[in-house]
Image: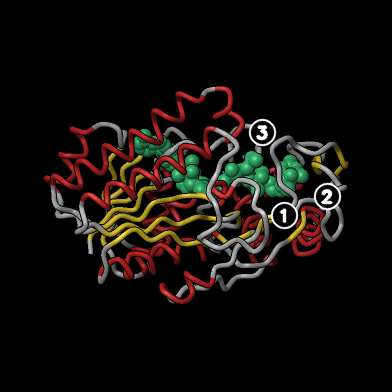
């Protein structure tokens, strides 16, 4: 199969391209490099010893998409491209609605035009808002707490309505929990240019002495040690979930949401201690007030993905800490 990967030079996209190539898929990437670097293409090729076709451009650019679909017989699409910073989405909601929604509708229009009927979409556990219980199953009520989350929920609805109107389409919506870690080669991973919002990139910048200390947002939640609990998942496990989803879509139609998580909750303080132990580094931290909008606990029931996709997260939190740091050591400049 020949797969178009939008946002393929980003964090999750690059790891997924590696798994696609390792599983004998052909890969075409479109990315506008708004949050990634073109050097990632060469890194993907080095890891896999295979070639990818790369288009630098915007998924909202319909003419470019038509050109790509004209030049290549594309069998399926994985749509990662989008903006993802929660705080920025509160400040600049239109930037998020324009990019995340328009890239999705433009892509669907062109897929329909070229009779390409299989799409895997990057969604997020953020669509569950503050869950009434844990673990979270796919049938929990959907609601969001910020514009970024709303773009994910609206894209899910667009895909659902589109699939209903076009029953020959098959759509997998993958709701990621908290992806961290990096490829074991240390060549690709996550290294935000600005001060990170998410926990693992922040821990790494503190461990690398680029930031003085971590702020732990709250120690008075009703959790094991008072700090927030999340379902951290290794990005390579997540990438493999996309391969399984594509294989599933081959023989089915319909709209299919799946949780991709480990099913295990880990607290902020537990993650910090594991990171220190596994990597033998110091991560100074202070406890500060809760971050507004945070929930106490959030972890997946990923049984549906296990049952229907034959997928299960295999890697441990220790693997996530080791691989993330291995990447960071190679890229700290
Ligand atoms: P990322 O920013 O590393 O990757 C996204 C890529 O899309 C970047 O390379 C960026 O340059 C590109 N891009 C953005 N808008 C584009 C456009 N209009 N046209 C072409 N390229 C465009 O993010 P990521 O962490 O790899 O996330 C991938 C997807 O998964 C996103 O849709 C994100 O919302 C979703 N997601 C991520 C997480 C997470 O924790 N990383 C969690 C849940 C869901
Ligand atoms: C956040 C987003 C979510 C998005 C996900 C992946 C919010 C409210 N949610 O999830 O929509 O899908 O990232 O991009 O922003 N923490 C600290 N100190 C820090 C950073 C985080 O203590 O410097 C804590 C948080 O309070 C939380 C945990 O670490 O308990 C994980 O935080 P983070 O990595 O930002 O992910 P989420 O908040 O789960």
Which residue has dot 2 on it?
221
Q: Residue 115: where, in percent of width, then height? A: 14, 52
The residue positioned 43% from the left and 50% from the top of the image is: 122
On the question of residue 279 being in view, the answer is: yes
Pick whichever of labels 2 and 1 is earlier in the sequence.
2
The circle on residue 161 is none
Which quadrant does the N terminus fall into?
bottom left
The chosen color scheme is secondary structure
**In whole angstroms, how far apart are the C-alphas of marks 1 and 3?**
24 Å
Q: Is mark 1 within 8 Å of ligand 2?
A: no
The residue positioned 51% from the left and 60% from the top of the image is: 139
* Location of residue 225 with respect to 96 vertically, above or below: below
Q: Neighbour class for label 2 at 10 Å: few (<14), some, many (≥20)?
A: some
Lateral position of residue 102 relative to residue 134, left or right: left
Task: Between residue 190 and residue 199, name the one nearer to us.
Answer: 199
Point out the frontmost of discs 2 and 3.
Answer: 2
- Helix, strand, or loop for circle 3? loop
Q: Residue 74: where, in percent of width, then height? A: 19, 55
Q: Quadrant of ligand 2?
A: top right
Pick whichever of labels 2 and 3 is earlier in the sequence.
3
Q: Neighbour class for label 3 at 10 Å: few (<14), some, many (≥20)?
A: few
The circle on residue 195 is 3
Q: Residue 33: where, in percent of width, then height? A: 40, 35
Which residue has dot 1 on it?
297
Which quadrant does the C terminus fall into?
top right
**CB within 8 Å, label 2 to label 1:** yes
């Amino acid at each position: 199969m020949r797969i178009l990967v939008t946002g393929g030079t980003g964090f999750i996209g690059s790891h997924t391209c590696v798994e696609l190539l390792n599983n004998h898929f052909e890969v075409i990437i479109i990315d506008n490099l708004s949050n990634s670097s073109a050097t990632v293409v060469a890194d993907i090729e080095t890891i896999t010893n295979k070639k990818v076709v790369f288009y630098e451009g915007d998924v909202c650019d319909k003419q470019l998409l038509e050109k790509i679909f004209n030049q290549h017989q594309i069998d399926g699409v994985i749509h990662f491209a989008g903006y993802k910073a929660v705080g920025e989405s509160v400040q600049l909601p239109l930037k998020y609605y324009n990019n995340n929604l328009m890239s999705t509708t433009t892509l669907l229009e062109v897929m329909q035009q070229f009779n390409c009927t299989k799409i895997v979409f990057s969604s997020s556990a953020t669509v569950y808002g503050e869950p009434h219980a844990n673990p979270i199953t796919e049938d929990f009520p959907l609601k969001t707490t910020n514009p970024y989350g709303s773009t994910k929920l609206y894209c899910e609805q667009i895909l659902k309505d589109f699939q209903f109107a076009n029953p020959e389409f098959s759509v997998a919506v993958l709701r990621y929990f908290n992806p961290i870690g990096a490829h074991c080669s240390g060549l690709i991973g996550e290294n935000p240019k600005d001060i990170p919002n998410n926990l693992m990139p922040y821990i790494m910048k503190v461990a690398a002495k680029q930031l003085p200390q971590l702020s732990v947002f709250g120690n008075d939640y009703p959790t094991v040690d008072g700090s927030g609990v999340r379902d951290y998942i290794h990005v390579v496990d997540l990438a493999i979930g996309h391969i399984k989803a594509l294989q599933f879509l081959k023989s089915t139609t319909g709209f299919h949401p799946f949780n991709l998580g480990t099913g295990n909750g880990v607290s902020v303080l537990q993650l910090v201690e594991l990171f220190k132990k596994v990597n033998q580094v110091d991560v100074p931290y202070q406890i500060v007030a809760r971050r507004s909008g945070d929930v106490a606990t959030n972890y997946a029931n990923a049984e549906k993905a296990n049952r229907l996709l034959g997928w299960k997260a295999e890697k441990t939190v220790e693997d996530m800490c080791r691989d993330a740091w291995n990447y960071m050591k190679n890229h700290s400049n």
